[in-house]
Image: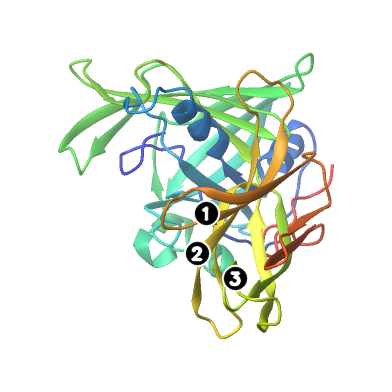
Amino acid sequence: MQVRREGLLLWGLAAALASPAWGAGEAVRLTSWLAGEWNNHEQVWAQKAAVQPGKAVTDPIPHTHHLFVPVAMPQLGSQVFYVQQAAADRLDQPYRQRLYRFSETGENEVKLEIFGLPEEATWRDAQLTPERFTRLDPAQLKTFPGCEVLWRYRAEEASFEGGMKPDACIIQSARLGKKIIINDRLRLTENALWINDQAKDEAGQHVFGSRSDTPVKARKVRYYTGWVAINRGGKDAPRETPFSLRRDLLLHSEGKRLVLKLDDGSDTPYDLELAQLTYQRTTVPILKLALIDRASGKSLAYTWASTDSDRLGFNLGWAQVGLTRKTEQPAFGFLPPKL
């Protein structure tokens, strides 16, 4: 999914609060799996790592962060999501928000309908004020006929496969000043979301989407909270130099990087990054916590743990970090429903 373009299956950012009504059947399974935050950090990292130094990445995969939030909006339906998408390095600048309505249309089949919001920019981070949706008139929403996604559950693979009717989704692109035809293919499991969306103009010319037909492969994020203690004089300072202690760390498992600050709010020269990765020529994924020199981008130290670790950290003497998995309210107050 390319950044800053006219896609319709748009995936989001940030936090959430809601208690919607949930129906029965496959729609419950699908919405339970989809609810939460998603990020394709490892896919982007692996693509860059596979390229020789000095060589450019061909057909680069965009790095995006997605949020799907169930909201209470009975005037539209019993299963409604607020969706917000941003580039992973610009989470404070979401470029599109949508509403999704889910309904069951047949055995093992779920329909997803897409709605545009009025004055879209005013709905940024609307998941933080979910009561707004209860007051929203459905007549104010923009519809996209032909752009519905049909999902079918594949029991043998424990996954949902989704797609649009071929060439049925046609929209007028304000940015391009012409009509574009969108075709999306998707795959969803409990922890993986693959998005392969392609667009062409009426002459059949490519508009967006991977030219190599490579889907965006996002994974559901897991949050960790923790503390950091840093010698105020830096890594070469005497041990008796006073330490700064902060207990407000919040990172997620998909490449979240934080600027480490002292307890007076001033920046240190270091970043902290947490990422689930699978290194080349290996098949075992690990959770890597790294202390990074911001100027050079190089890791000063790192530690590995299994991906299901509840706690991890390191002690370098002058810098110490401890993280604990956030089991309650993992996505800033949002918990997906239980099956």
| Residue 320, percent from left and from top | 72, 65
Q: How is the image coloured?
A: rainbow
Q: Which residue carries the number 1 mark?
A: 13
- Residue 180, compared with residue 130, is above or below; it is above
**Residue at x-position 20% and y-position 44%:** 174
The amino acid beneath tag 1 is Leu
Which of the marked residues, 3 or 2, is nearer the chain's N terminus?
2
**Residue at x-position 77% and y-position 39%:** 307
**Residue at x-position 42% and y-position 23%:** 51
- Classify the position of the C terminus by image quarter: top right
- Classify the position of the N terminus by image quarter: top left
Local SS, label 1: loop
Q: Which residue carries the number 2 mark?
A: 125
Answer with the quarter of the image where residue 292 lies: bottom right
Which of the marked residues, 2 or 1, is nearer the chain's N terminus?
1
- Residue 218, compared with residue 212, is above or below; it is below
Q: Which residue carries the number 3 mark?
A: 131
The amino acid beneath tag 3 is Glu
- Which mark's residue is nearer the viewer, 2 or 1? 1
